[in-house]
Amino acid sequence: MAIYCLDTYALWEIHFENPKYSVLLNHPFVITNWTLVEFYRTMLKRYGKQTSVFWYNKLIAYIKDVDVDILFKAVDYQHENKSEDLSLFDCIGYIYSIENNFIFVTGDKAFKNRKGVLFIQK
């Protein structure tokens, strides 16, 4: 059975109860610690501390720590694809997924046709 690695885009769509994304909660999934940090930061900015902490507590059980070697591979990947303006957070999630044979789930068009990606259009 496939394991999904959700990016921040996917988490926002789950927050908005988009059924195309919410269905992923019925399958095995993980979230990198970096993705949770980014999601927390964006939730904090939009909704404040209480909502950010709520989502942190809801997602913490699915968090996987990213090893430093994957961080460097992600920085390399971002650099190699600098013309595409990929975020470091997304590159970390993507490389983490590739290294662990997970499927990277996103709605970010920059990752639409990449190997190992489940692109879900909003």
Image: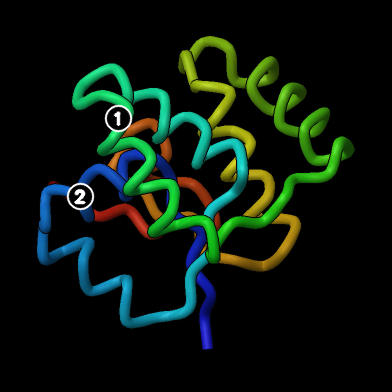
Task: Between residue 74 and residue 25, name the one nearer to us.
Answer: 25
For residue 9, what is the image quadrant? top left
Residue displayed at 22% across by 74% down: 23
Q: Which residue is mark 1?
A: 43
Do labels 2 and 1 touch, CB within 8 Å?
A: yes
Q: How is the image coloured?
A: rainbow
Which element is circle 2 on? helix
Corner quadrant of residue 19 = bottom left
Q: Is residue 116 shown above or below 92?
A: below
Report the front residue among 35 and 20. 35
Q: Which residue is mark 2?
A: 15
Q: Residues within 10 Å of mark 2 (few under 14, many from 20)?
A: few
Q: In terms of depth relative to the viewer, which is nearer, 83 or 106?
A: 106
Q: Amino acid at mark 2?
A: His
Whole-number angstrom distance, CA of label 2 to CA of label 1: 10 Å
Mark sitting earlier along the chain (2/1): 2
Whether residue 29 is visible to the viewer of this picture, yes or no, is yes
Q: Is residue 52 above or below residue 1?
A: above
Looking at the image, which residue is at 26% across and 24% down? 48
The relative height of residue 109 versus residue 62 in the rendered view (above or below) is above
Does residue 117 appear in this view? no
* Residue 30, above or below 26: above
Q: Where does residue 20 sit, x and y in percent of width and height? A: 15, 64
Report the residue at 38% width, 31% height from top.
110
Q: Quadrant of residue 82?
A: top right
Position of 33 with respect to 56 (left or right) is right
Q: Residues within 10 Å of mark 1 (few under 14, many from 20)?
A: many
